[in-house]
Amino acid sequence: MARSEVFQRLVAGDPANPLFRFSLGQALSVEGDTAGAIEHLRLAVASKADWMMPRILLGKSLLAVGEKLAAQEAFTDALALAVAQGHEEPEAELRALLATL
């Protein structure tokens, strides 16, 4: 069973759970369904204003499907959170990603 199937069942049982949405988006992304991941990552992002990781993965997913402006916005939001929260490695990664856009 694919990992995304586990999280699809969890989301079906509790569609408002942002952790399930993030985990499903992450699993879909790993499995190569980047476009399918975006909806779940957007819902995870909308659930918490200070949650950096879904914003990073959303940006990467948007970039992979060619939505550069939306990816840039997600990366910029994530960068602000990385700086505010003192996450040095994600900050460096986000600065590098933004430099490519």
Image (cartoon, rainbow, N blue to C red):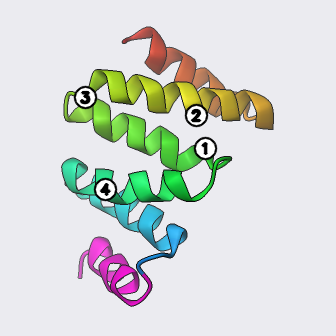
Which is more foreground, mark 4 or mark 1?
Answer: 4
The region drawn magenta spans 1-14
Residue, disc 4: 39
What's the mark number on residue 78?
2
Q: Position of residue 89 (x, y in %)?
A: 66, 30
Q: Is residue 20 left or right of residue 40?
A: right
Q: Is residue 92 above or below residue 51?
A: above
Q: Earlier in the sequence, mark 2 or mark 4?
A: 4
Residue, disc 3: 67
Residue found 46% across the figure and 9% down from its top: 99
Q: CA distance from mark 1 to mark 2?
A: 5 Å
Q: Residues within 10 Å of mark 1 (few under 14, many from 20)?
A: many
What's the mark number on residue 52?
1
Q: Position of residue 31 (x, y in %)?
A: 24, 58
Q: Is residue 47 above or below residue 98?
A: below
Q: Earlier in the sequence, mark 3 or mark 1?
A: 1
Q: Are marks 4 and 1 in contact (CB under 8 Å)?
A: no
Q: Earlier in the sequence, mark 3 or mark 4?
A: 4
Dot 1 amino acid type: Met
The N terminus sits in image quarter = bottom left
Q: Is residue 76 left or right of residue 65?
A: right
Q: Earlier in the sequence, mark 2 or mark 3?
A: 3
Q: Are marks 3 and 4 in contact (CB under 8 Å)?
A: no
Q: Main secondary structure of the magenta part?
A: helix
Q: CA distance from mark 2 to mark 3?
A: 16 Å
Dot 4 amino acid type: Glu
Q: CA distance from mark 3 to mark 1?
A: 19 Å
Q: Position of residue 21 (x, y in %)?
A: 43, 67
